[in-house]
Amino acid sequence: MCVLSSTAQAQTAKQYRADALAIEGIVNSQYAYLDHLPGGVMPMSDNLRREADAVEDSSALLQYGDHAVTALADHHAITGRSFRDTWAVTPSYSDLWIERQDGDWRIRAVRAGSPAEARVCGRAMSWPR
């Protein structure tokens, strides 16, 4: 999904706001995993709607986009930019792959040769399970 596009002209605050407000419709018409979401639509809170309505520039649009995508709770869904508090982007040097299963968090894979393997897998566990 591509929401943002570059143009030779600078966008106005109104155009940035329109882009922010368009994200919900784009997700609802193009996101592949709507069936995983409550009600089959993008989760939107009053706070997210207010944030979208307040977007006036590219920084605010990217920040809102990051928050909107986070609402999908899909670690593969990203805006292409990440911030210090972006949880969806997993650094490539991660040693553990953790997923939620039946209400609990479970380690699903451990990087071979990592410090995590020495600590977690040293307990006679095989990975991935």
Image (tube, rainbow, N blue to C red):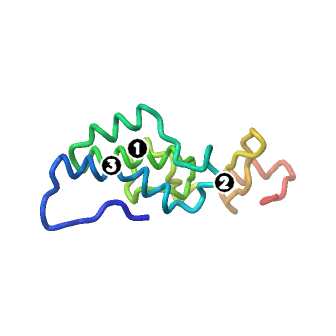
- Residue plotted at (75% across, 38% down): 103
Q: Position of residue 31 (x, y in %)?
A: 52, 60
Q: Earlier in the sequence, mark 1 or mark 2?
A: 1
Residue at the farthest right position = 124
Residue at the farthest top position = 46
Q: Is residue 107 left or right of residue 22?
A: right
**Quadrant position of residue 97:** bottom right
Element under label 2?
A: strand
Q: Position of residue 77 (x, y in %)?
A: 51, 56
Rendered-image quadrant of the C terminus? bottom right
Q: Amino acid at mark 3?
A: Ala
Q: Which residue is mark 3?
A: 20
Element under label 1?
A: loop
Q: Nearer the observer, disc 2 or disc 3?
A: 3
- Which dot marks residue 46? none
Q: Earlier in the sequence, mark 2 or mark 3?
A: 3
Q: Position of residue 67 (x, y in %)?
A: 43, 43
Q: Amino acid at mark 2?
A: Trp
Residue neighbourhood size for the residue with mark 3, other residues' Cα within 10 Å, grouped as few (<14), some (14–19), many (≥20): many
CA gap between label 2 and label 3 equals 31 Å
Against 7, residue 107 (above or below) is above
Element under label 3?
A: helix
Q: Earlier in the sequence, mark 3 or mark 1?
A: 3
- Residue plotted at (47% across, 35% down): 45
- Residue plotted at (38% across, 47% down): 83
Q: Which residue is mark 2?
A: 97
Q: Is residue 49 left or right of residue 121?
A: left
Q: Amino acid at mark 1?
A: Arg
Q: Is residue 40 left or right of residue 30?
A: right
Rendered-image quadrant of the N terminus? bottom left
Q: Which residue is mark 1?
A: 84
Residue at the farthest left position = 9
